[in-house]
Amino acid sequence: MNRKVIANWKMNFSLSEAIDFCRIITERYYKLPLAMDQIGYNFSSELIIAAPSPYLAYLVYLYPHISFAAQDVSDHETYGAFTGEISAKQLHSCGVNYCIIGHMERRLNFGEDNALVKRKSDACINAGITPIICLGDDVSQALRFDEKCIIAYEPKESIGTGVISGSSKLEEVFGGLKSMVAKTVNLVYGGSVNSSNLLVVKSVGSIDSIMLGGASLKIDELEKILNNW
Ligand code: PGA
């Protein structure tokens, strides 16, 4: 599905809160259990929840209509003596289909650089997971990534600040990105998106998908965004 809403929960919610949230959004957005005449109904957007790693296997098992992402992954492939790391192969074995890589918070707080982001992305692709690569203003980095990746533009000044980039800046950045990557690459905008400014982002034709931080923690807000994206 081309239009995606990526809910980046970051380090929020206990397991029981996460389960309740997924149950309520399943009832409201997917309207489950489905009535017979709704079976086969096409939802406008794919919901991808990037939940804390320890919850993923359980949430995948409980909520098959929702797609799940990890928020990070090891650059070491498969298995081995890397205490505390989680490999892409392990995430895949839990039914996880996506992984956010190189989020600005990881670049700023954990020193992740472009070389590490590329290794993590390759590890995901080799394990059958679609990487969601987060880029800041240096969008030319998109050229380094496989066409199986999703590319997210998340300007530092918009993450968690309530300040969204203007539509002319978004047109310029995403127009540039579109001309740089394969036609099939899904392009994401992230940074302070909420139900009030959603239309600004939606007006930019080359943006396929959105990533939400704060807005993804409020059920009413997420439901509104899902129904209007
Ligand atoms: P925000 O976060 O929506 O709270 O600005 C976005 C993100 O970190 O991806």
Image (cartoon, rainbow, N blue to C red):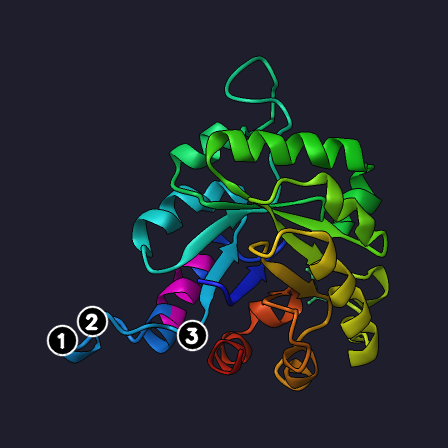
Q: Vertical placement of 100 versus 163: above or below?
A: above
The furthest residue to the left: 36
Mark 1: few, some, or many residues within 10 Å (few <14, many ≥20)?
few
At 46% from the left edge and 64% from the top edge, which residue is drawn? 47
Residue 201, picture quadrant: bottom right
Percent across and percent down for residue 8 are 60, 58
Tag 3: amino acid: Ser
Q: CA distance from mark 1 to mark 3?
A: 19 Å
Residue 159 visible in the shown view: no
Q: Disc 1 designates what residue?
A: 36
Q: Disc 3 designates what residue?
A: 44
Mark 2: few, some, or many residues within 10 Å (few <14, many ≥20)?
few
At 75% from the left edge and 67% from the top edge, which residue is drawn? 175
Lower sequence index among marks 1 and 3: 1
At 37% from the left edge and 49% from the top edge, which residue is drawn? 60
Tag 2: amino acid: Ile
Q: Is disc 1 in contact with disc 3, using a CB cutoff of under 8 Å? A: no
Q: Nearer the viewer, mark 1 or mark 3?
A: 3
Q: Disc 2 designates what residue?
A: 39
Q: In the picture provided, is 126 more to the left or to the right than 121?
A: left
Region of the chain picked out in magenta, as a range: 18-25
Residue 115 visible in the shown view: yes
Q: Is disc 1 in contact with disc 2, using a CB cutoff of under 8 Å? A: yes
Lower sequence index among marks 2 and 3: 2
Q: CA distance from mark 2 to mark 3?
A: 14 Å
- Quarter of the image with the N terminus in it: bottom left
**SS label for mark 2:** loop
